[in-house]
Amino acid sequence: MSRFLPTAPYRGTRDFLPPEMSVRQQVLHRLYEVAESYGYLRYDGPILEPAEIYEAKSGQEIAELQLYTLTDRGGRRPALRPEMTPSVARMIAGNAGALQFPVRRYCNANCHRYERPQRGRTREHWQINVDIFGSDSPNADIEIFSVVHDMMAAIGATRDMYVLRPATGSCWRASSPRSSGYRPTGSGPCPTSSTAGKRRRATSSGPTPPTPASATSSSTGWRPPSRRARTRWRACRPTSWTGRT
């Protein structure tokens, strides 16, 4: 065994030395300015969450193959967050009584997934999330598109360098060229609106998000909802866009 510890970072993660950090901060500052110009407020949450949240609400691939989990000294099973949606839904549900909807939030989340490192995909990544909670208007989707276009313009990207790809047809129909004037252009590498349609539809299918009393348990605190509570959970899911770096 070598007497020296390795100097390389853990596989799938990166070091940010001062030159890289300077560029990164300048890019992020421009993205933050755009989000805040639309009225979005920045938030963050714990990097550790109960593993049950992701096992109940994330996809099978994430929950079974990509989740970093551990068992702490109290026998609990926390996990490094692989995405931000369950965390922000928990926060909105837990504070719904103090919020005025629709709510606009954004974050730059540090996430971890155990997957094979490759070009453009690492085990540690940061992602910009832009979310609207509590609106069933197609204007929410259109606004998200506008935010993304302005973010790309803020970092010098022209319209022929990227294309937005909504995840579902309902989202595309709500913001079609006939209704909004939106028309994607270009081809090749692009930021993907991977969950916008799905989450907007979920937002419109339920009532106002639950109050803290209906979202918590007196003995264990917040927990993922049962099937019976699924409608209330869906009401807390956002119209959103995620950009991964």
Image (cartoon, rainbow, N blue to C red):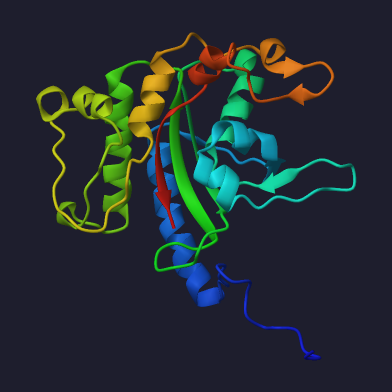
Q: Which residue is more in the foreground, 59 or 207?
A: 59
The answer to whether one can see residue 95 in this image is no
Q: Residue at x 44, y 32 (%)?
A: 131
The answer to whether one can see residue 197 in this image is yes
Q: Which residue is more in the foreground, 102 or 219?
A: 219
Would you say 201 lies left or right of 76 here?
left
Residue ranking furthest to the top: 207
Q: How many marks?
A: 0
Determine whether 161 is above or below 167 in the image. below
Where is residue 128 drawn, in percent x and y? 46, 47
Quarter holding residue 10: bottom right
Q: Residue at x 22, y 29 (%)?
A: 172
Quadrant of the rendering where the N terminus is positioned = bottom right
Q: Residue at x 49, y 61 (%)?
A: 25
Quadrant of the rendering where the C terminus is positioned = bottom left
Determine whether 242 is above or below 182 in the image. below
Residue ranking furthest to the right: 73
Would you say 108 lies left or right of 159 here?
right
Q: Which residue is more in the foreground, 167 or 66?
A: 66
Would you say 89 lies left or right of 33 here?
right
Where is residue 66 drawn, in percent x and y? 57, 52
Q: Residue at x 56, y 32 (%)?
A: 57
Where is residue 6 drawn, in percent x and y? 70, 83
Quarter holding residue 7: bottom right
